[in-house]
């Protein structure tokens, strides 16, 4: 679990990702967790200020917009609640497929550029 967190943290610090693209798949494929259990575990791990040290480094180097970060945090606070409510209404198979489609769309957009 520590290795999963470490890899998620390094990639989070590098690319701003961690939970959805690293931790959840690792818990499913390496640890055999069910999709909803992996999602809930990932969210629980992200509750404390896990990005504080990385964010402070970006801030010290002038690479942070605090206003935007605060607005995003507010959106995340509310959005995580509604995302969890929606996901709880899905079957594990539907949740897995929706997540896979999300990853494919993100990957295609990144490959195609602007």
Image: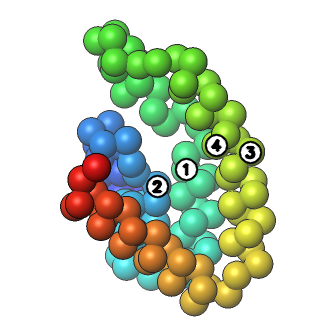
In the image, which is nearer the foreground, mark 2 or mark 3? 3
Could you tell me if the residues under marks 2 and 1 are in contact, i.e. CB atoms within 8 Å? Answer: yes
Of callouts 4 and 2, the N-terminal one: 2
Query: Separation of disc 2 and disc 1 at Cα?
Result: 9 Å
Query: Separation of disc 3 and disc 4 at Cα?
Result: 5 Å
In the image, which is nearer the foreground, mark 1 or mark 3? 3
Say few, some or many: other residues with alpha carbon within 10 Å of mark 1 (under 14 / 14 to 19 / 20 or more).
few
Estimate the x, y position of residue 44 in percent, counting from the top left: 61, 53
> What colouring style does the render use?
rainbow
Residue 26 image-quadrant placement = bottom left
Helix, strand or loop at disc 3?
Answer: helix
Query: Separation of disc 2 and disc 3 at Cα?
Result: 17 Å
Disc 4 target residue: 76
Tell me what residue is drawn at x 30 percent, y 65 percent. Answer: 107
Of callouts 2 and 1, the N-terminal one: 2
Of callouts 1 and 3, the N-terminal one: 1
Helix, strand or loop at disc 4?
Answer: helix
Of callouts 4 and 1, the N-terminal one: 1
Helix, strand or loop at disc 1?
Answer: helix
67 sits left or right of 2 in the view: right
Could you tell me if the residues under marks 3 and 4 are in contact, i.e. CB atoms within 8 Å? Answer: yes
Estimate the x, y position of residue 52 in percent, counting from the top left: 47, 26
Of callouts 2 and 3, the N-terminal one: 2
54 sits left or right of 80 in the view: left
In the image, which is nearer the foreground, mark 4 or mark 1? 4
Disc 2 target residue: 19
44 in relation to 87, above or below: above
């Amino acid at each position: 679990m520590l290795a999963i967190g470490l890899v998620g943290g390094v990639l989070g610090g590098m690319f701003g990702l961690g939970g959805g693209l690293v931790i959840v798949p690792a818990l499913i494929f390496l640890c055999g967790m069910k999709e909803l259990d992996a999602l809930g575990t990932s969210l629980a791990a992200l509750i404390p200020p896990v990005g504080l040290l990385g964010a402070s480094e970006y801030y010290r180097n002038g690479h942070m917009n605090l206003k935007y970060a605060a607005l995003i945090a507010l959106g995340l606070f509310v959005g995580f609640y509604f995302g969890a409510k929606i996901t709880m209404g899905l079957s594990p198979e539907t949740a897995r497929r929706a997540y896979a489609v999300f990853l494919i769309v993100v990957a295609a957009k990144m490959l195609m550029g602007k």
